[in-house]
Image (tube, grey):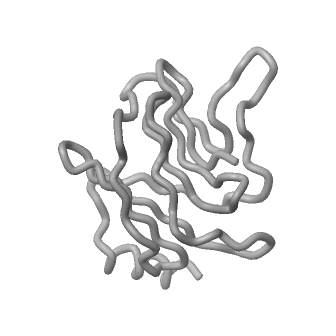
């Protein structure tokens, strides 16, 4: 299920796998960086991912304001071109690709990598 997706020359997306783990994939060649914790179903969750670009390429996951782990993103970078979709990866001839089944109440994008303290503060202010 896709939370944010960009279907352009690559298939960058952030979502939840069938296993219940969060995943961040930057392009078609990347298998994706997967979170440690399974996101519980049927209840409100505050899911955050930060991404450090450049040579580091680290995805850091937070669930309900708590650090869930960091993982190296093996390849690629999201395109700066094309549309960014909320709730699905993009459109195909047959409709929405990898739709999110559930409710998404808020999506925020920042022009910097949030610190763990900032993620915790935003979670506490939202719950």
Figure label count: 0
* 99 versus 28 height, above or below: below
* 64 versus 56 height, above or below: below
Instruction: Give the x, y percent position of residue 25.
Output: 48, 42
Comparing 22 with 8, the one in front is: 22
Instruction: Give the x, y percent position of residue 100.
Output: 73, 48
Residue depicted at x 52% and y 34%: 84
In the current view of this chain or complex, which residue is farthest to the top?
93
- Corner quadrant of residue 91: top right
* 20 versus 81 height, above or below: below
Residue depicted at x 28% and y 59%: 113
**Image position of 111 (left or right of 49):** left
Residue depicted at x 68% and y 62%: 20
The quarter of the rendered structure image containing the C terminus is bottom right
- Corner quadrant of residue 80: top left
- Corner quadrant of residue 75: top left
Instruction: Give the x, y percent position of residue 14.
Output: 54, 48
* 22 versus 94 height, above or below: below
Comparing 9 with 125, the one in front is: 9
Residue depicted at x 37% and y 56%: 59
**Image position of 74 (left or right of 48):** left
Comparing 41 with 114, the one in front is: 41
């Amino acid at each position: 299920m896709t939370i944010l997706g960009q279907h352009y020359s690559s298939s960058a997306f952030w979502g939840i796998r069938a296993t219940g783990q969060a995943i961040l994939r930057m392009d078609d060649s990347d298998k994706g960086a997967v979170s440690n914790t399974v996101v519980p179903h049927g209840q409100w969750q505050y899911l955050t991912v930060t991404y450090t670009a450049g040579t580091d390429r680290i995805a850091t996951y937070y669930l309900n304001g708590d650090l869930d782990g960091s993982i190296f993103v093996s390849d690629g970078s999201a395109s700066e071109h094309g549309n960014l979709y909320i709730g699905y990866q993009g459109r195909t001839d047959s409709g929405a690709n990898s739709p999110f089944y559930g409710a998404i109440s808020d999506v925020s994008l920042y022009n910097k990598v949030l610190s763990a303290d900032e993620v915790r503060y935003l979670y506490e202010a939202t719950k």
